[in-house]
Amino acid sequence: MRARRFTRSDRVATGNTSEVFRWTSTTVVKVLRPGIPQECAAQEADVARWAHAAGLPAPAVDGIVEVDGRPGIVFERIDGRPMWDLMQATPSELTHMVESLVGLQASLHAAAPVGALPSLVVRVRFKIEAVTALPAEDLAESLMLLDQLPIGSALCHGDMHPANILMSSRGMVVVDWFDAATGHPTADLARSSLLMRPPMSSRAVSAFLGGATRAFLTRLHDTYLDTLIARGLHDAAPFATWEAILAVARLAEPVAPGDLSNVWAAYKAGPAATAATSRTSSGR
Ligand SMILES: Nc1ncnc2c1ncn2[C@@H]1O[C@H](COP(=O)(O)OP(=O)(O)OP(=O)(O)O)[C@@H](O)[C@H]1O
Ligand SMILES: [Mg+2]
């Protein structure tokens, strides 16, 4: 492992679980934040390396290094801006960009067999078992629902949202492959819907889609659902069930629990409440 320190000017971006710095003229290093288990670096590097080797739109991986005592993954530097920045800079292009995102996601779902990846269902089960913010009966109910859903064998990125897509000269490149797994496409789409949901409270901000108003996030989420429906990818009943289960599982991640608990509570309250929360804007 090589050791090196960084200054602020080296910083490329700040993620939820990491900081990304310039490493060489052609690479960046993704340094995990304190508290994130160190083995996550090797796991993410393995999956990203596999995705790149499989010809998927992922950055090449150059190895693991140590930065200030923390593990960092060295990636090929992708020269491009996040789709999320471009959406905010050019809101008139939002629909077009969401269509590109959904097209990219569907193409990953149709990619070649991905036997080397972990199982999405196993990961979700593991996360739900680690949740402490809900009563045991809710966890048992969500696990029972999970058992009733088809497992699937598609490549699921697991964290597909516009801040994880870089718009480069070689097209869209996807970063942040830590959560990639084999599973059902609807699970992956429902996870994206969950990630793009605007915060329920007007004072809260999205954990990773920062810098936008709640109204903008609402438009993004609605456009995402509209695009899935238009492409015949929104299978309403399993979609709602997956999103509710994934909200419970996400309670095991380092994020605020409020909205996630509400997604689960709305699902349990029945179809009417789920329909009311599936569209996040009024009058649609
Ligand atoms: N290979 C790369 N080349 C250029 N920029 C990159 C690269 N990898 C990541 N970035 C930038 O760093 C940001 C954060 O990276 P990444 O999404 O992998 O971190 P994270 O902490 O896991 O994010 P999250 O907030 O989704 O948890 C990206 O949105 C992107 O702007
Ligand atoms: Mg990210």
Image (spheres, rainbow, N blue to C red):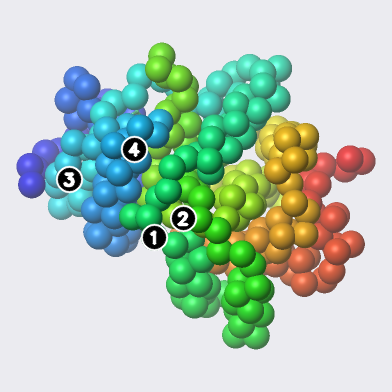
Residue 96: % across, % down = 67, 21
Disc 3 packing (10 Å; few <14; some 14–19; many ≥20): some
Residue matched to label 1: 118
State the CA–CA distance, disc 4 to disc 2: 15 Å
Closer-to-camera residue (241/211): 241
Element type at mark 1: loop
Amino acid tagged 2: Thr
Proximity of marks 4 and 3: CB atoms separated by less than 8 Å: no
Q: Quadrant of residue 73?
A: top left
Residue matched to label 3: 64
Proximity of marks 2 and 1: CB atoms separated by less than 8 Å: yes
Residue matched to label 2: 182
The extreme bottom residue here reads 137
Closer-to-camera residue (60/139): 60
Q: Give above or below for 2 relative to 37.
A: above
Residue matched to label 4: 54
Who comes first in sequence, dot 1 or dot 4?
Answer: 4
Residue at horizontal 24%, vertical 59%?
A: 38
Element type at mark 3: strand
Closer-to-camera residue (111/35): 111
Ligand 1 appears in which quadrant? Answer: top left
Residue at horizontal 61%, vertical 82%?
A: 140
Can you tell which mark lies on residue 74?
none
Mark 4 sits near ligand 1, with its Cβ under 8 Å away: no
